[in-house]
Image: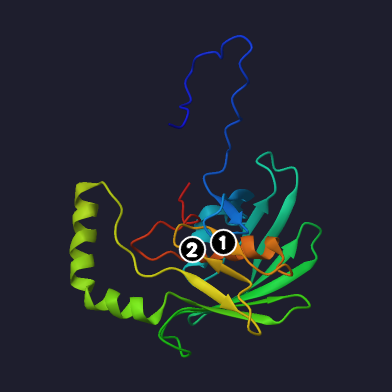
Amino acid sequence: MSPVATGRKPRKGAPAPPPVSPFSHVVRVTDVPGGEARILAHLERELPPGGIPAYLAARKDGARSFVLWADPERRARLATVVTASAGDGVSAYQVLGGYGEVLGTVVREKACSGKGLRTRWSVTQTGCPEAVGYKGRIFWWYVWWLLYPLWLAIGVGSLVNGGGDVPRGPRRIRWRAVGETPFEFHADGEVVVHAQWTDQRLAAALTALVTSFDSWLGMPWDDKRE
């Protein structure tokens, strides 16, 4: 059973409880599928001059702006995600390191926007080959659409009752580059890094982007109105 935080003072000699993170969302990374994941980054929106209203208005067209902190105290910036272009279902992002150096680029092409029936994510790490991944497997998308009326009924029931999770479409993504699978995104929100040449900062930024594009049945972490 997990420990529960209370307002009581710790017993004499007992270790101090861990500090409460001010971040509601983090990126967890593991090097082995099913292995223990560790927190790599703490996610925070980087708001434009217009504040939250301006950010929410821009994100409708695909714009995103994140900071990935290496620690909950915001002492070290692990990476930054900025939007290079957005619109018409295609968005391009640049991922910068802690000192502003370019780690790589990410391009998202929305499903049915011209290059296929699935959302396409292409990632180019500086000095490495391009990796391309598609959201979900074709087989599971067929199953999903065949059973869509059932999923819709379950989703509406969950929203009306105010409890439980709503069913969502396939979310797993595997990126492939020159015969390798450098990393993959799991439906539970974790990213698994396989190739040693993969920059984990870029993989973490990619995870932040993917989860920010959760479907209307999900809960994108960056669309908070406060």
Q: What residue would you read off at disc 1?
A: 191
Q: The N terminus appears in which quarter of the rendering?
A: top left
Which residue, given by chain and number where applicable, does mark 2 sit on?
186
**Residue at position x 59%, y 59% in the image:** 32
Query: What residue is drawn where x is 18% and y is 71%?
Result: 149
Which residue sits at x=61%, y=9%?
12
- Could you say where residue 43 lies in the image, as x and y percent from the top left? 59, 51
Q: How is the image coloured?
A: rainbow
Q: Is residue 87 above or below residue 76?
A: below
Which three-letter amino acid code belongs to the residue tagged 1? Val
In the image, taking residue 99 as reference, residue 42 lies left or right, namely left
Which residue shows up at 48% across the image and 89% down it? 115
- The mark that comes first in sequence, 1 or 2, is 2
Would you call the spot at circle 1 few (<14 residues within 10 Å), some (14-19), or many (20 or more)?
A: many
Residue at the bottom extreme of this rendering: 114
Residue 68 in sight here = yes
CB of mark 1 within 8 Å of CB of mark 2? yes
Which x, y percent locates residue 106?
62, 74
> Label 1's element?
strand
